[in-house]
Image (tube, grey):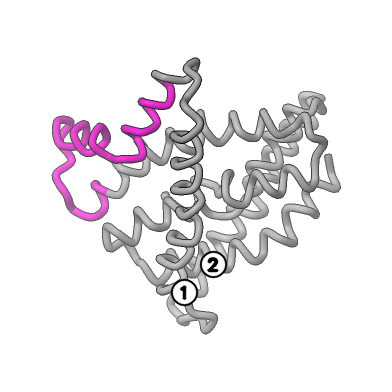
Amino acid sequence: MLVIVLGNTSFVGIPLIQALLPPEALPYALLYDQTGTVIALNTYAVIVAAWYSGQDTSWRKVSRTIFTFPPFVVLLLAFATFPLDYPHWFTYATGRIAESLVPVVMVAVGLQWQLKLDKEHLLPLTVGLGYKLVLIPAIVFAVFAVLDLHSVAAQAVALQTAMPAMISAGVVAMAHGLAPRLVSTIVGYGLLLSLVTVPLWSQLL
């Protein structure tokens, strides 16, 4: 419910969209990521993690958790100050800080990931990766084909649904003690397999 539902539409999604689709697709891929995946991470993922980790799931507690979740706070600030021009020094500093996020998150996941698969994880891993990398994009591609949607925006959205499991959602799951080894395995193997599956899906666009 965390790493399979939410896709890696930023760290992996943006570079793959840039590599596989025309330049005009990038704004739509960014829109999908920022107004879809990121908001879901900051709300839905927090609620699911709290619920299944046995934490207090009262409306007051969940609301407090969401509105004090650092990424959600920053997202609200970004929306509130979107039209403003930031000073160059501020943009440069925050840009360098943001660039450090990817290796930090990858290390956090990598510490839990092992190439050797645990037998009890084989079935949920297979089902999870099949759902994320095959079933979800297959449904989206089929619906878009029936509706005759072939614009650049449709292509960007369709390909974003084929991205592997979201790393940040995996970190949230592991931080709450929700099957950390299985989560890291899904994220790790999903990332590797997506380098093959996503280009294959792009051939259907």
The chief SS type of the magenta part is helix
Q: Mark 1 points at which residue?
A: 113
The C terminus appears in which quarter of the rendering? Answer: top right
Q: Which residue is drawn at 38% across and 57% down?
A: 171
In the rendered image, residue 68 lying in the magenta stretch gets the answer yes
- The magenta stretch spans which residues? 50-79
Q: Does residue 134 appear left or right of residue 78 in this picture?
A: right
Residue 188 in the image: state x and y as whole percent: 54, 67
Q: Residue 14 carries which label?
A: none
The three-letter amino acid code for the residue at tag 2 is Gly
Residue nearest the observer in this picture, 61 or 35: 35
In the rendered image, residue 135 lying in the magenta stretch gets the answer no
Q: Name the residue under label 2.
A: 188
In the rendered image, the vertical position of residue 191 relative to residue 21, given as above or below: below
Residue 135 in the image: state x and y as whole percent: 64, 50
Label 1 element class: loop
Residue 81 in the image: state x and y as whole percent: 42, 19
Crowd tier of the residue under label 2, counting other residues whose Cα lies within 10 Å: few below 14, some 14–19, many 20 or above: many
> Between marks 1 and 2, how big is the CA–CA gap?
7 Å
Q: Which residue is drawn at 43% across and 22% down?
A: 79
In the rendered image, the vertical position of residue 190 relative to residue 204, given as above or below: below
1 and 2 marks in contact (CB < 8 Å): yes
